[in-house]
Image (cartoon, rainbow, N blue to C red):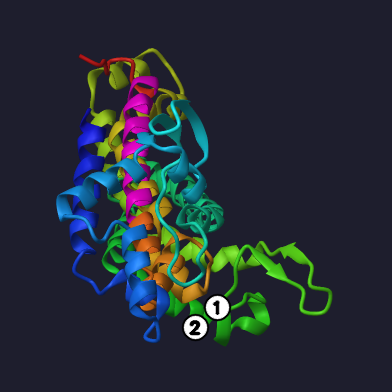
C-alpha cells in the first residue's frame, strides 16, 4: 500500500511539473505547424480537456490496471490482456507513457532500449563496491587502530566527499586520455559498439571499466564505513566472546558469526545505492557517453522531449520501490530475528 501511495505521489508530481513547460503540440509539429494540425494533436493528447480530467486519463495510461476502449488500444498499440466489450475493456497491460516528441517512438520502447545498459553498469559498479567495501570494512574492524584501519577510514572519507561528476571527469581524463596508451581504455563508449567497416554490432567490455569504477567509488566508501562500524559493534557482543571461548578460529568467528549479524545496515546501504545507480547515473553515463537511462534522460531534457523525461522519472520511482521491497525480504533471509509484524 505504501508503494502504491508513493507511485501515486510521483505521478502527481511529474504531471504537475511538466504541465507548465511549453506546448506539447508545438513541440511535436515545430514552428511551421498549422492550426488544424495543432488542434488535432491537442485532441489526441487530451490537452483540450480540463486539467483534472487530463490527470485521470494520464493515470489510466500509466497504470498497469486500467479501462480502455478498442480504439485506444489500437491507436496507442497497448500490449497486455483485455476483457470486456468494444467500448470499455478492463486492461492488464504495460504502462503507456506516450511517444517521444523527437523520434515518435513509444517512450516505453526508448526506455527499454536504454535500461539494459544502466542495469549492467549498476550491477558491475555495485559488485565492485560490495566485494571490496565489505572486505575492507571487515579488515578495518578486525585490525582496529592499525595502519590498515586508518588507511581504510581515510580512503572511505575521501571517496564519500568526492562528487561523482568530479571523479568521473578525473577518471576520464587520466585513464582515458593521459594514460590511454597504457590502459587502452576509451574516453567514451557503450556496452555495444558498431564496426564502422562491416556495420556489425559487437560487445565492448572495456568500455564498462571506467564508468563502473567511477560509479562504484561512493557506494564502496559508504559500505566500508558501515561494515566497519557494524562489525565493531557486533564483535563486542557476548556471543562472540563465547565463540572464542569455545575455541573457534578467528576467521570462523569473524566471517560466519560476526559478519552475518553485522550485514543488516550494510544491506540497507547496498539496496539504496543500487536503486539509485539502477535508476539512472545521470552524470556518469553522460560524461562517459554510456547509453543508459541517465544519458537518455539528459538528452531528452536538452531536446525538450518531455514524455521520455516523465517516463524515466516514473521508471526510476518503480525501481526504488521494488528494490526497497526486495531489501525487506533480504533482512529476513540474513537475520531470522527480523519478522514482519
Q: Is residue 105 left or right of residue 133?
A: right
Where the C terminus falls, by quadrant? top left
Cα gap from disc 2 to disc 1, whole angstroms: 6 Å
How many marks overall? 2
Q: Do the residues labelled 2 and 1 touch (CB within 8 Å)?
A: yes
Q: Residue at horizontal 67%, vertical 76%?
A: 184
Where the N terminus falls, by quadrant? top left
Segment tinted magenta in the rendering: 313-333
Q: Residue at horizontal 61%, vertical 68%?
A: 207
Question: Which residue does the numbered mark 2 point to in the structure image?
Answer: 173
The label on residue 332 is: none
Please tell me whether residue 317 belongs to the stretch shown in magenta.
yes
Question: Can the viewer see residue 10 in this picture?
Answer: no
- 179 or 168, nearer to the observer: 168
Badge 1: few (under 14), some or many (20 or more) residues near its Cα, within 10 Å? some
Badge 2: few (under 14), some or many (20 or more) residues near its Cα, within 10 Å? some
Q: Is residue 135 above or below residue 19?
A: above
The label on residue 175 is: 1
Residue, far right: 198
Q: Is mark 1 on a helix, strand or loop?
A: helix
Q: In this view, does 165 lie above or below 248?
A: below
Amino acid at each position: 500500500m505504501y508503494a502504491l501511495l508513493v507511485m501515486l505521489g510521483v505521478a502527481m508530481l511529474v504531471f504537475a511539473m511538466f504541465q507548465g513547460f511549453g506546448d506539447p503540440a508545438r513541440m511535436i509539429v515545430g514552428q511551421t505547424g498549422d492550426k488544424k494540425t495543432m488542434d488535432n494533436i491537442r485532441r489526441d493528447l487530451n490537452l483540450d480537456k480540463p486539467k483534472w480530467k487530463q490527470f485521470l486519463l494520464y493515470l489510466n495510461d500509466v497504470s498497469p490496471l486500467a479501462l480502455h476502449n478498442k480504439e485506444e488500444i489500437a491507436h496507442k498499440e497497448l500490449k497486455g490482456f483485455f476483457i470486456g466489450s468494444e467500448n470499455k475493456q478492463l486492461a492488464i497491460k504495460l504502462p503507456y507513457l506516450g511517444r517521444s516528441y523527437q523520434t515518435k517512438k513509444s517512450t516505453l520502447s526508448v526506455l527499454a532500449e536504454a535500461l539494459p545498459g544502466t542495469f549492467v553498469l549498476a550491477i558491475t559498479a555495485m559488485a565492485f563496491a560490495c566485494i571490496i567495501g565489505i572486505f575492507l570494512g571487515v579488515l578495518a574492524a578486525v585490525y582496529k587502530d592499525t595502519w590498515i584501519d586508518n588507511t581504510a577510514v581515510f580512503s572511505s572519507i575521501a571517496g564519500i566527499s568526492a562528487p561523482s561528476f568530479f571523479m568521473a571527469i578525473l577518471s576520464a581524463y587520466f585513464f582515458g586520455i593521459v594514460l590511454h596508451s597504457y590502459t587502452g581504455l576509451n574516453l567514451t563508449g557503450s556496452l555495444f559498439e558498431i564496426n564502422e567497416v562491416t556495420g556489425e554490432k559487437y560487445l565492448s567490455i572495456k568500455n564498462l571499466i571506467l564508468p563502473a569504477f567511477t560509479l562504484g567509488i561512493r557506494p564502496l566508501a559508504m559500505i566500508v564505513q558501515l561494515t566497519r562500524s557494524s562489525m565493531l559493534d557486533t564483535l563486542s557482543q557476548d556471543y562472540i566472546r563465547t565463540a572464542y571461548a569455545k575455541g573457534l578460529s578467528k576467521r570462523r568467528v569473524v566471517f560466519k558469526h560476526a559478519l552475518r549479524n553485522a550485514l543488516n545496515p550494510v544491506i540497507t546501504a547496498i539496496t539504496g545505492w543500487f536503486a539509485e545507480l539502477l535508476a539512472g547515473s545521470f552524470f556518469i553515463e553522460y560524461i562517459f557517453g554510456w547509453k543508459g537511462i541517465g544519458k537518455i534522460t539528459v538528452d531528452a531534457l536538452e531536446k525538450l522531449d518531455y514524455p521520455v523525461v516523465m517516463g524515466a522519472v516514473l521508471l526510476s520511482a518503480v525501481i526504488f520501490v521494488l528494490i526497497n521491497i526486495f531489501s525487506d525480504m533480504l533482512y529476513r533471509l540474513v537475520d531470522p530475528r527480523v519478522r514482519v509484524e
